[in-house]
Each structure stands twice: as structure tokens, then as C-alpha cells.
Image (cartoon, coloured by chain):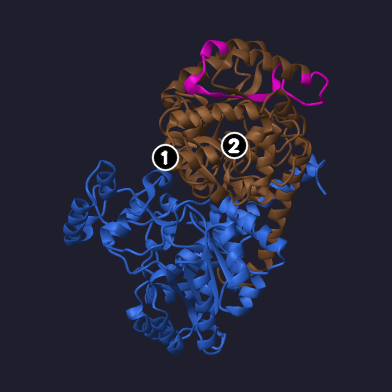
Chain colours: A brown, B blue
């Protein structure tokens, strides 16, 4: 399956590492830096596409002198959409002007809505822009595979930071079950694993589970090219034990006044003062008022007692420094290969020695 | 780290596969079958230890003619405890008579309670019985490692079936973060991964994450030697897409009248009629009454419209048949090795070819 991806996106190194579209954070500088480093950067369109054409123009400028072997007529980056709130005309206008190598669809009101989106993208870009769809369950994966027929399925587990299914499995069972379900239907679509993967061992694990590549969000929050407040970034580096210190909730949508997410989604982030106050019974009105006051504090709005949204996955404790995208990709790539070869070395002899079960 | 385990438990094959203690299910036949197959079977003591001595005596009988290279004076199986409700005198009386190769502690009221438990086990068995402790977060792992100083830490992710932390990460981030945290404190304790692992690819992934072995529960629900109602077993084989069809809840403790679990724990199981009714507002009293009526139905109490407790992890969709423990262990062992070697083969050449990042 990797060979399909390498042929569509010839600049990608192996293993395939993807910078996930994070709203307002994976903007042109990070998306471009990701692809320049041999990864696949996805510019976040979010749900408000009024500035998408400008953002793509900026990416095109940043890519002008880059030495990237992109296919004819596309930018070697992708664009992510939160489909539930995205305007299809704004999207197509932007994609027509600057076709990216792929779009990444996520969270339509109904999965069936992705069909016309995919059709339009393929029509507007003459099929040059590939269609990726992010799902969070076996059922969603099969439905999308059979209807939208995407070029790639991104399988998001419950460890992921930011929005995802409120109720789902992690990649440890999701990825193999989807791989088997697709094989059972004789559907050949590469899958990408996402959720809780912040470093090389987890990337290697995802490949072992059957993924053809790995998407990372949280790791790139602590990236020099991310468009992110220093306070948020400091908090990502500070926080550890993400299974305990992060929570899934829709509170931060409420506080930010973002309505319209389909009910099955919420977001994982650090449980800071806003969350603790809500748990203790503070009204949404009061919490929102305090949130808006906190926004005036700048970087001081984040931290153990901060109130600002701090979306992050359970792998946040494995993010310990802020680095350029290229270093992050290089490190994870090498560490993943190292984890794989070391694990095989640990076992190959032993398994032969114990012998009785080898095929 | 594996070598420590192989030296303590010389009958174990590689990779190390463990039959998790599942209350009333991993009884003498399954625990013994697991160890006979080169795995490590943990007899479930649960929280009511009145029959533990008898269960261990049964295991000892079943092991009498077995060709297992157990260390002098111990049974080549383990015993699991739900420490919050376990009577330490009953435990020690049983362990003294039939020392197992290891005990597995879980869910004490306070982590500090494990210290006297560990001390007593080591005293009563002259150190022959090793101490394993199951935890679900980096914080718990470090605290237990520094105080109880167990021989093994079992790291349970949120995908696990049955009881576990109500709020935690999956193994994808939990295992590498704990491995790093222990290394940072220069503590050498092997870790075992648990939660969502039902087949070879996930087992391989767990080893890649840094685990020295893998514990499986849900897979062994569909095992011929499990002490389990056929209705429950059929349901495990029927259900798929476990991230969607299972839920974490303490409802089934309520319905079964099991009080006393520390508040931070709940259990993952199939969301059947009991759960749906509770969600729709049915009173605990009414739900409990119906549960007790359902218990009279035998195997009919399980199924899409059943009410009986059906604990299972998110990997339940990967469990497709009922097999002897030996076949399960053989299959997962081989599939794990296959997944590792195939993944390395997929990447080793490519990574060298792309080259620029190799160390």
C-alpha cells in the first residue's frame, strides 16, 4: 500500500509521516515545512474557509523555490476541512486556483455529504487532488470506503488531541480491525493511523498494526513553524501523563462559541481551570465570560491555572521540546526504524530458539 | 528486560503472552492451559478469596503431569487479586500452600496498600512468588515502582475490557511514556502491555512500544478452557467495532451488587439492553430487578437485546472464533513475529533508499 502513496506523493520519505491539519495552527509555514522535510503537511482549512485561498497562495509562495518532487500542477501539501461547517464554493474556488496534492475531509454532518465534496474536488482539479477521509470507527471506515471511495482513510483513535469521535477505540484495535474489514470486502485503500502517536516507537507500532503511514498533531504543536501562542506551546511541553491530564469534552467549543459540530464529536485537551470550574458546577455563561477575559492575558492564559483551550492528545507527555519540523520528522523517522529493527532483533533469535511455534 | 522474565519464568515462549486474570473466567483450566502452551496463565482470585485455596489446589492437580520447566517449589501460573476487596489472610494461606510463580495486584484502595501485600507475599513464599502490579497511568507506575518495587508493571490502556481506570490513555502513548519515566529514574522493571490487544499485529505493536510482553483478556473469553457461559462467549464472537459497541461504565457493578471498587475505576463492556435502558433513564432499582430476572434465562441473557454483563475490550471485533488456549497463543505468537518481520521488510530498503535520515 505504501507504494501507492509514494507514487501519488513522490516527495515523501519512508516511513510516511503526516503533519495533521490543526485549525489555526497548521498554517502555510508548518504545512510547507512538513512537506519540505519529506513529510506531508496538511494546511488546516478548518470550517471557515474565507481565508483559504490566501493561505494557499502563501503556501505556494513558500514552496516556490523548494526542491520538492511534486507531481505536475499540484502543491506538495494537503488541505484539511471540517466539512460540517465548510462552504463548498469557497473550497472549490481556492482548490481550483492552487490544487493541493490531497484534501483531508473530516466530520461532515452525515457521511453521505462527502460524496458530492469528493466529486467536486476531483472535477475541479481534474483528479490531480487526491481525497483523504478521516474516520474513527470500523463502521465509518466501511461506509466511506464504499461510498466516497477515498484515496486514503485516516483512522483516528481516541487518544488524539482536538476533535474526534467522543466515543471510540484507540488505534491498537481500530487499525487492525479496519484493515481486516477492508480486506474482507476486497477494498484496497491505504490507511493512515492517528491518535496518541508523538514519537518513533508509537509510529513504528502503527506501521506494525497495518497502517501505511502516521499522522501527528500534538507533536507539531511544539514545532517552530506552528502558528501557535507561546503560552500554549509551553503548556504542551510542560504537561505529562496525558491519559490523566487530558480529557474529552465539548466545553471548549462552548467557550469559544463554536457551534455546529455534529453531536458525536468532542475534543481532547488539557483539563485546565475552565474544565475544572465547569466540573465544579460553574455556569456556561460565567465560564465563557472568564474565558473571554482570559483571552486578554496573552500567553498567561495557558498553564496549570489557565483557562485557554489547550487541545492535545494523550501523547503530550512525550513532547518535551520545541523543534523545527524537519528535526521532528527526521527524529521520528529514525526512531521508528530503530524501534522496529531493535524489536525484531530482540525476538528473531528467541522465537527461533523456542522454536516450537514457528511456521 | 525479556531476559529477566525468561529467567524467572523459564517455561515462557517468546514473545511473552499472558492470560490476564478475569474474575470467574480465568479459573484453573484456563490458567493452566495458558502456561502449558508457553504463555503465562493468571488464575483470577477476584476480591472474594474464599475459594482461592481450592482453585489453586485444582490448578496444582491439573499441572501434576505437565511438562513445564517451572522453578523449584512454585506453580507455573500466577494469581490475580482485586486488592480493594481481598482478605490478606485468606490470600496468604492459599499462597503458602501453593505458591504461584507470580501474583498480580490491581486496584487497591490506595496504592500504598500494596506495600504490605508485597512484603507478606515475599515473606510467605520466601521470595519465590514474584510481585506484578497493574497500573493505568504514568503517575501510578512511578509511585508503585518507587514504593512497592514490583518485579513487573502491567500497563493497562483504556481499550481494555473489564475494570480499569475510568479515565486513561491507551497503550500507544502510555507504554512509551512509562518506559521513559522509569529509565529517567534509573528503575529497571519490565513492563507488560494490556488493553485492546487481541491478535498478533497489536501484540507486535506493544513490543515495539517497549513492552516486554503482552497480556490478553478479551481474546481468551473465546477460549475453550475459559469458565464462561456460552451466551457470553457467543456475544464476544458476534460483536465487532468495539470502540463503538463497548462502553466504560460502573453500571454492571451496580447491577451485580458489587460495591467497593475505588471510584477511579469502572469497567468496559458491550453496551447491551441494561446500559441502553440506564441511558434512557431507567432507575437502578428497576434495572437491577430486570437483571436478576435475566439471570434466570441462561445463555439467552446475552445478545444484542441481552441484559447480562458482557465485559470486553475494544479489540472484541478481532475475536472471531472459539479456540483452545494453545492455538490462540500459537497463532498470536506467530502472527506477532510475522507482523514485525513484514513491517521491517517493508521499510528497511525504502528507508535506506530515501537514505537522507539514516543515522
Relative to B182, B148 lies left or right: left
On screen, B324 above or below A127? Answer: below
Question: Image point 17% across, 56% down: which residue?
Answer: B289
Give the number of the disc on residue A310: 2
Q: Residue B170 at what x, y percent from top left?
A: 53, 51
Relative to A259, A76 lies left or right: right
On screen, A266 above or below A359? Answer: above
Relative to A10, B105 lies left or right: left
Q: Residues within 10 Å of mark 1 (few under 14, many from 20)?
A: few
Q: What is the tally of numbered marks visible in this picture?
A: 2
Residue B78: in sight, yes or no? yes
Residue stretch rendered in magenta on the structure: A62-90
Residue A230 location, quadrant: top right
On screen, A183 above or below A97? Answer: below
Q: Chain of mark 1?
A: A
Q: Chain of mark 2?
A: A
Residue A137 location, quadrant: top left
Q: Residues within 10 Å of mark 2 (few under 14, many from 20)?
A: many
* Mark 2 or mark 1: whose residue is earlier in sequence: 1
Q: Nearer the viewer, residue B228 or A129?
A: B228
Q: Where is the C terminus of chain A found, in terms of image quarters?
A: bottom right
The residue where tag 1 is placed is: A281
- Tell whether position B76 is magenta: no
Q: Residue B285 at what x, y percent from top left?
A: 20, 53
Q: Residue B297 at what x, y percent from top left?
A: 17, 59
Amino acid at each position: 500500500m505504501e507504494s501507492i502513496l509514494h507514487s501519488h506523493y513522490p516527495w515523501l520519505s519512508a516511513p510516511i509521516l503526516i503533519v495533521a491539519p490543526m485549525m489555526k495552527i497548521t498554517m502555510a509555514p508548518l504545512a510547507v515545512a512538513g512537506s519540505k522535510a519529506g513529510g506531508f503537511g496538511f494546511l488546516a482549512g478548518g470550517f471557515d474557509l474565507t481565508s483559504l485561498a490566501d493561505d494557499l497562495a502563501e503556501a505556494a509562495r513558500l514552496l516556490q523555490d523548494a526542491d520538492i518532487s511534486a507531481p505536475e500542477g499540484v502543491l506538495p501539501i494537503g488541505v484539511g476541512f471540517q466539512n460540517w461547517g465548510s462552504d463548498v464554493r469557497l473550497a472549490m474556488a481556492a482548490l481550483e486556483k492552487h490544487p493541493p496534492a490531497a484534501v483531508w475531509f473530516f466530520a461532515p454532518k452525515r457521511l453521505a455529504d462527502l460524496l458530492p465534496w469528493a466529486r467536486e474536488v476531483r472535477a475541479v482539479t481534474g483528479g490531480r487532488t487526491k481525497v483523504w477521509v478521516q474516520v474513527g470507527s470500523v463502521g465509518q471506515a466501511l461506509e466511506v470506503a464504499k461510498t466516497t471511495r477515498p484515496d486514503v482513510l485516516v483512522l483516528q483513535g481516541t487518544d488524539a488531541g482536538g476533535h474526534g469521535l467522543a466515543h471510540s477505540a484507540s488505534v491498537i484495535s481500530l487499525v487492525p480491525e479496519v484493515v481486516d474489514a477492508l480486506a474482507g470486502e476486497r477494498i484496497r485503500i491505504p490507511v493512515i493511523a492517528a491518535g496518541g502517536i508523538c514519537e518513533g516507537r508509537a509510529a513504528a507500532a502503527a506501521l506494525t498494526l497495518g497502517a501505511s503511514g502516521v499522522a501527528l498533531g500534538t507533536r507539531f504543536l511544539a514545532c517552530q513553524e506552528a502558528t501557535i501562542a507561546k503560552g500554549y506551546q509551553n503548556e504542551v511541553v510542560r504537561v505529562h501523563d496525558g491519559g490523566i491530564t487530558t480529557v474529552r469534552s465539548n466545553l471548549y467549543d462552548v467557550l469559544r462559541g463554536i457551534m455546529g459540530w455534529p453531536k458525536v464529536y468532542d475534543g481532547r485537551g488539557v483539563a485546565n481551570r475552565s474544565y475544572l470550574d465547569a466540573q465544579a458546577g460553574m455556569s456556561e455563561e460565567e465560564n465563557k465570560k472568564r474565558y473571554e477575559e482570559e483571552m486578554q492575558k496573552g500567553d498567561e492564559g495557558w498553564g496549570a491555572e489557565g483557562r485557554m483551550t489547550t487541545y492535545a492528545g494523550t501523547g503530550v507527555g512525550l513532547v518535551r521540546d520545541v523543534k523545527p519540523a524537519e528535526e521532528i520528522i527526521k527524529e521520528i523517522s529514525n526512531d521508528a526504524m530503530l524501534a522496529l529493527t531493535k524489536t525484531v532483533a530482540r525476538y528473531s533469535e528467541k522465537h527461533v530458539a523456542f522454536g516450537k511455534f514457528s511456521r
